């Protein structure tokens, strides 16, 4: 896909090709291409329409019904923020009084569109010309082109915090400072697409992000969920977000946008739950108890396990392992709860005998603090029987231990 093909897709002929392609993407791709070609669609446009149709279908999970009219690159879709996460962040920015915002490296525009929908005027800067053109097309497709404009360029080469905000749509730099800056840096190496873990290798890089926060106090940037807490700027709030149990991102809220040192946001369907705290506490340690709580990834990564343990009167069985044990099963959005039926020091022979005894033929395997490979263990257990169970591989007082459990519904 290139800029010419994107322009061609946006003509009436291109839109007809896209509409036809959308009906064909379920079937054989060669047959779909042949059908478009037989309808007189040039080969390049046919291929681009089929790719867009496939990406639009895949994008529904992140963008919902908007996906049907938007434009995507494969890399841009992979990196785009999920709709509910972007909408929640945008609502928080708006509630904090943000009226104008620069989105540095706006990608295909997921975050910018969500912000524009709350009424924030967004100036996107995007280094990749095709991605920038798609972001502009996506602003039109989602009906926010009057509040979200895109400039193509390398954000590190000019002062992105100084847009000409006196006239909306202007891309001249050197005007009034904007209220806020958002940056979701690329965290994949150009060319290979491999993830980068060192913030210095983000694009734009870490130093640039910290510099933004110095110039515009209301700065928010996204980081990898595995970020080392030690590199987070002092006084900022770091928030980890999970959606339906999957840890999807972390964001750093700077200046007056910071409410608390650490926040775990757990989105379950349309409902959001927030656990907050200093991220430094340690949960008390005790024995294995009747119920085991497996905290959500957002709780673990935000170092809020002690806060969570407090909500269920829980303790850890090993100070380094984030399983929380308690006497009661309490409904909580922050963890899965399992009832512990058996506790045994890890021994393959003993575990196999126990599972045979209990007629367990199916297991899910959870682990923290164990080097065992779950799939290999599953094979080695040679399971058979009608029952199912959860096996938790962990350490208790530093000893390799296996817990036989049942999920609490
Ligand atoms: C993770 S994506 C942004 C995704 C976006 N937040 C969304 O949800 O759709 C990062 C984007 O930053 C762009 N980028 C990287 N370095 C840049 C730079 N120095 N200036 C402008 N854009 C840059 C990349 O081309 C990429 O599209």
Image (cartoon, rainbow, N blue to C red):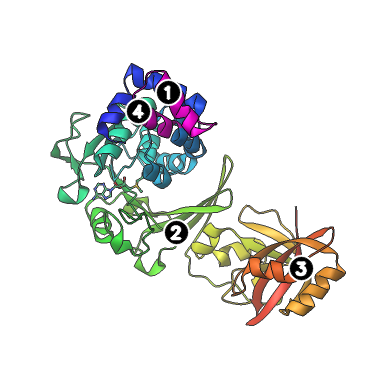
Q: CA distance from mark 3 to mark 4?
A: 53 Å
- Camera-near label (2 vs 1) is 1
Judged from the image, the secondary structure of the residue bearing numbered disc 4 is helix
Does ligand 1 reach within 8 Å of label 2's beta carbon?
no
Of residue 36 and residue 180, the one placed in the foreground of this image is 36
| Residue that carries the numbered disc 3 in the rendered image | 382
Q: Nearer the viewer, mark 2 or mark 3?
A: 3
In the picture, the disc for residue 225 is: 2
Q: Are marks 2 and 3 in contact (CB under 8 Å)?
A: no
Residue at left offset 74%, top offset 59%: 329
Mark 3 and mark 4 lie on one chain; the one further toward the N terminus is 4
Given the current orientation, which residue lies at the most extreme left position? 174
Residue underneath mark 4: 43
Mark 4 and 1 residues: CB-CB less than 8 Å, in contact?
no
Q: Which of these two is toward me, 138 or 169?
A: 138
- As for residue 288 lying within the magenta part, the answer is no
The percent position of residue 29, horizontal first and vertical second, equals 48, 33
Report x, y in % for residue 158: 15, 47
Disc 2 and disc 3: Cα gap in Å? 36 Å
Q: Which residue is mark 1?
A: 36
Task: Look at 58% across and 58% down and name the residue there.
Answer: 296
Q: CA distance from mark 2 to mark 1?
A: 43 Å
Q: Which region of the structure is painted magenta?
A: 25-53
Q: Please tell me whether residue 36 belongs to the stretch shown in magenta.
A: yes
Task: State the image coordinates of residue 104 (x, y, percent, origin top left).
Answer: 27, 46
């Amino acid at each position: 896909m290139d800029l010419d093909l994107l322009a061609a897709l946006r003509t009436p002929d291109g839109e007809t090709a896209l509409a036809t392609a959308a009906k064909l993407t379920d079937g054989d791709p060669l047959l779909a291409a042949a059908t478009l070609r037989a309808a007189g669609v040039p080969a390049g446009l046919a291929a681009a329409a089929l790719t867009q149709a496939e990406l639009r279908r895949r994008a529904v999970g992140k963008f919902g019904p908007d996906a049907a009219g938007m434009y995507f690159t494969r890399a841009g879709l992979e990196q785009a923020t999920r709709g509910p996460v972007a909408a929640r962040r945008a609502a928080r920015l708006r509630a904090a009084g943000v009226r104008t915002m620069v989105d540095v490296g706006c990608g295909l525009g997921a975050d910018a569109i969500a912000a524009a929908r709350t009424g924030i005027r967004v100036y996107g800067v995007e280094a990749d010309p095709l991605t920038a053109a798609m972001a502009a097309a996506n602003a039109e497709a989602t009906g926010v082109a009057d509040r979200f404009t895109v400039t193509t360029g390398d954000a590190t080469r000019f002062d992105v915090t100084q847009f000409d905000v006196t006239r909306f749509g202007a891309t001249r730099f050197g005007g009034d400072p904007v209220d806020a800056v958002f940056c979701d840096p690329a965290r994949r190496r150009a060319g290979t697409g491999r993830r980068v873990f060192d913030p210095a290798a983000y694009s734009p890089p870490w130093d640039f992000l910290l510099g933004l926060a110095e110039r515009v106090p209301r700065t928010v940037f996204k980081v990898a969920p595995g970020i080392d807490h030690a590199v987070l700027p002092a006084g900022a709030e770091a928030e980890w977000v999970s959606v339906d149990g999957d840890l999807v991102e972390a964001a750093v809220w700077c200046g007056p946008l910071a409410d608390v040192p650490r926040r775990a946001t757990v989105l379950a369907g349309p409902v959001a739950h927030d656990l907050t705290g200093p991220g430094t506490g340690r949960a008390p340690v005790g024995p294995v108890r009747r119920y085991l709580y497996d905290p959500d990834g957002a709780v673990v990564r935000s170092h809020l396990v002690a806060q969570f343990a407090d909500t269920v009167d829980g303790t850890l069985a090993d100070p380094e392992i984030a399983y929380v044990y308690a006497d009661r099963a309490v409904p909580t959005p922050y963890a899965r709860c399992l009832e512990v039926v058996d506790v045994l020091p890890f021994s393959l022979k003993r575990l196999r005998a126990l599972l045979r005894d209990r007629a367990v033929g199916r297991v899910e395997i959870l682990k923290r603090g164990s080097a065992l490979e779950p799939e290999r263990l599953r094979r080695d257990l040679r399971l058979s029987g009608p029952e199912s169970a959860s096996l938790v591989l962990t350490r208790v007082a530093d000893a390799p231990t296996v817990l036989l459990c049942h999920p609490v519904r």
